[in-house]
Image: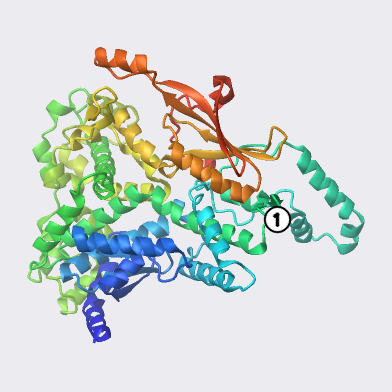
Amino acid sequence: MIDREKRQTAAELTEPTREANALARKLGLDPYDVHYWIVDHDEMNELIAYDGFQTRYPHWRWGMKYEQQRKQRQFLGGKAFEIVNNDNPSNAFLQQSNSLADQKAVITHVEAHADFFANNRWFGLFGSEDGPNAAAMLERHARRIEEVLSDPEVDREAVERFVDTVLTLEDNIEYRRAFDRKSADGDPEAVDETLEALGVSDEVRAEVFDDDWLEALEADVDDVQFPPEPEYDLLAFLREHGEAYDEDAGKAVEFEDWQREVVEMLRREAYYFAPQRTTKVMNEGWAAYWESMMMGEEAFAGTDEFLDYADHQAQVLNSPGFNPYKLGKELWEYVENRANRREVLERLLRVEGISWRNFHDAVDFQQVADRLAPPEALDSVTSETLDDVATLPEEYVDAEALAAAREGEIDVDRYPWKLFTYEGLARRHYSLTKPQFRGFLRRVTRGELESTSRYLFEDERFATVEQALDSVDFTVGWERMFGVRESHNDVTFIDEFLTQEFVDANDYFAYEYSQTRGDLRATSTDAEDVKKKLLLRFTNLGKPTIGVYDANHENRGELLLCHEYNGVMLDRKNAEATLERVFELWGRPVVLHTITKRIPENERKRARRNDREPEPEEVGVELRYDGDDLSVEELSWAAVEHLAADELDYDTKPDDWL
């Protein structure tokens, strides 16, 4: 019965999924192919617990996440609309009980996600040119860990404990670089592979690159400070150089093969999921933007579905707390508007009699808005207006689709967008003519006008405003969005586009916890303050930056980890617990250097009397765990000064992209 209902739902959604993909491609998106699956609410809970995949390795945390999701829906009324994974093809799961309006919203949202997965370079850091093939990878990992758990010679509890230990470090990867499948500097096996690739004969290898040479190579590596530069892929470092602590022997011993395998498998998974976390605002904003375009402006939601859709989207975009959908969508609209405004400004500033000095007085903004508005034949299309469509500029009209519509092969009243090209749809949805953005051109500052004017080429002048506006490229805004979508992550996206104009227009502000008053208070509407507040959430996945600084600390074989302090203290409890887990992967004592803030009581009292915030003192701290005891010592400022950033560093682009 249930399967029959699922098949019926799937049949009903065949046309919406096909047409949503066609519309997305007409709008310029280039998504992975998407396979849609119909699931019931319990299966949806399982998929959410499994991070969007049907098979994961055995572990208690999946059950915990499942129960959390189930209870959230049962007691708090939470509702799961969709889940889609980054794969080629992508797999999206639609909940059977959702209304048709919700299903269409999910489908359009998913098509935009699939476009982002396929075209954002940060997702390209993991996987091949054909995509990540993540489902197959995760299934292999699940099967292999199940085999280890079933091995009678391996203690099951030891495997579960080891997986727990590795998972405490899953965020300690170098997510800003392409996934490195093999880190083997100085490894004889790597040398052997290199010689083979160079075509060195067996005779030469036997005579020159013999065992003595390889031993000397390893000795040279041991003599050099290791690592020569801080290593941030802690999982890779421990996989290559770590050892397990043998309690019976009371010393470090070589990892067993399965242990090294588990570290690498979980490391790969961490790299796979990292781009989703580094582009959360961009990705969700991108999907919300195009979903709104398709469902609302292109009426993909039918007249009987639109109110339900609008209500649900409003709930999503206005949910309390930090909201990546709202922030992301508003930033994408700002990117589009700013590019379109620049294009119009460059035309208007070439009109005789208009300069950056007199722009606001010389330009009739209502006249500009009317001229930029799409022609009636493009804006309002029905099966009765096909002759009017034929009069539009040929670059706007899909001639084959128009001919098919005349033959009755296209339902124009339902899918008017099929008649138009990408250029035609860009004109149809030109952002500066939308009611909510009508004042965007007028808001331009004299500074931006002067800057735009300074870089104008004088090779084209216009006699009238009308002539200038007729030369506007209406695709500029979307093209700019596609370019940004390709290269940015959340940090660089917010850093570049969260301007004072954006903050003022959207009523953003920064807030802080008041040590004096004991509550949260709004502190600033300055864009730089708002930006810093947001970027701290995203830099290094919002987690502390920890590097391996010395694998032979004080010449005792101890591992020195350093916290690169950016003004935010470590959570001491979590840091201490994590050190104990790192010990299990190093096999010898582990040391952590960090910086913490301390407010003397007399300073706290003075601040309270003067109604100001106390000024904390920053001090160095060393935590050390030797397998039995955890010790804490204060360090001199000279010992930790190199860990303190003068200014927050938000630049997370690989060097060759700058």
Q: Quadrant of residue 112?
A: bottom left
Q: Who is closer to the viewer here, 267 or 637?
A: 637
- The reply to whether residue 457 is in sight is no
Q: Amino acid at mark 1?
A: Glu
Which residue is at a point 54% across and 23% down the rendered structure image? 641
- The reply to whether residue 538 is in sight is yes
Q: Circle 1 sits on which residue? A: 254
Rendered view: 515 above or below 137: above
Q: Quadrant of residue 31?
A: bottom left
Rendered view: 319 above or below 652: below
Q: Who is closer to the viewer here, 544 or 575?
A: 575
Rendered view: 383 above or below 176: below
**In the rendered view, does 416 fall on the left or right side of 458?**
left
Residue 193, x across and y down, in percent = 75, 59
Residue 113, x across and y down, in percent = 33, 59
Q: Secondary structure at mark 1?
A: loop
Which residue is at a point 17% across and 66% down the rendered structure image? 300
Q: Who is closer to the viewer here, 255 or 286?
A: 255
Furthest-right residue in view? 207
Q: Quadrant of the N terminus?
A: bottom left
Q: Quadrant of residue 355?
A: top left
Residue 18, x across and y down, in percent = 27, 73
**In the rendered view, does 349 fall on the left or right side of 384?**
right
Q: Residues within 10 Å of mark 1 (few under 14, many from 20)?
A: some
Rendered view: 620 above or below 95: above
